[in-house]
Amino acid sequence: MTAAEYGPSGVRVNAVSPGPTHTEGTDSLGEGLQQLAAQAPAGRPAKPEEIAEAIVFLATDRASFIQGANLPSMAAEPRFDRGCAADSAGHPMLANGNEPSQTSIRT
């Protein structure tokens, strides 16, 4: 699914790439999460509410002209700012080796 493919139909396709985020799922990482986040520009893990605010913004009319964007959180690894890498088959991969997810929003 791409913004270029679905944009003419009124569908906005954007992504949010959060970096280290403090959640119930990351509680078990303990100090490891703090150490990982300390290397990122924000120097701390994100709160889930902070990531949610970025997603809410993309869903509003204030972001109506934003299409095909990958919005890295300020706590994201610096590599996200340079976009995605590709695996041997040419599929996009994030710095951590995972496939990027996209959030599509119908306006």
Image (cartoon, grey):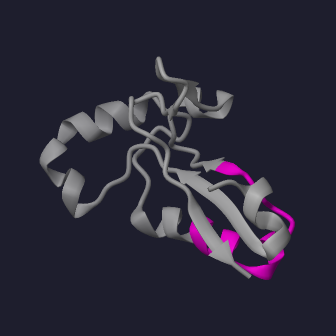
Quadrant of res 53 = bottom right
Residue 107 on the magenta segment: no
Which quadrant would the N terminus be assigned to in this image?
bottom right
On the rendered structure, is 8 left or right of 31? right
Q: How many marks?
A: 0
Nearer the observer, 53 or 96: 96
Q: Position of residue 98 (x, y in %)?
A: 39, 37
Nearer the observer, 35 or 7: 7
Q: Position of residue 92 (x, y in %)?
A: 54, 33
Residue 63 on the magenta segment: yes
Q: As displayed, is residue 105 above or below residue 6? A: below
Q: Position of residue 88 (x, y in %)?
A: 47, 17
On the rendered structure, is 3 left or right of 85? right
Q: Residue at x 55, y 56 (%)?
A: 102
Q: Position of residue 69 (x, y in %)?
A: 72, 51
Quadrant of res 83 = top right
In the orientation shown, which residue stands out farthest toward the left?
Answer: 28
Q: Residue at x 58, y 33 (%)?
A: 80
Q: Residue at x 18, y 53 (%)?
A: 27
Q: As displayed, is residue 98 above or below residue 106? A: above
In the orientation shown, which residue stands out farthest toward the top?
Answer: 88
Q: As displayed, is residue 13 above or below residue 86? A: below
Nearer the observer, 67 or 41: 67
Which quadrant would the C terminus be assigned to in this image?
bottom right
Magenta segment boundaries in residue numbering: 54-70
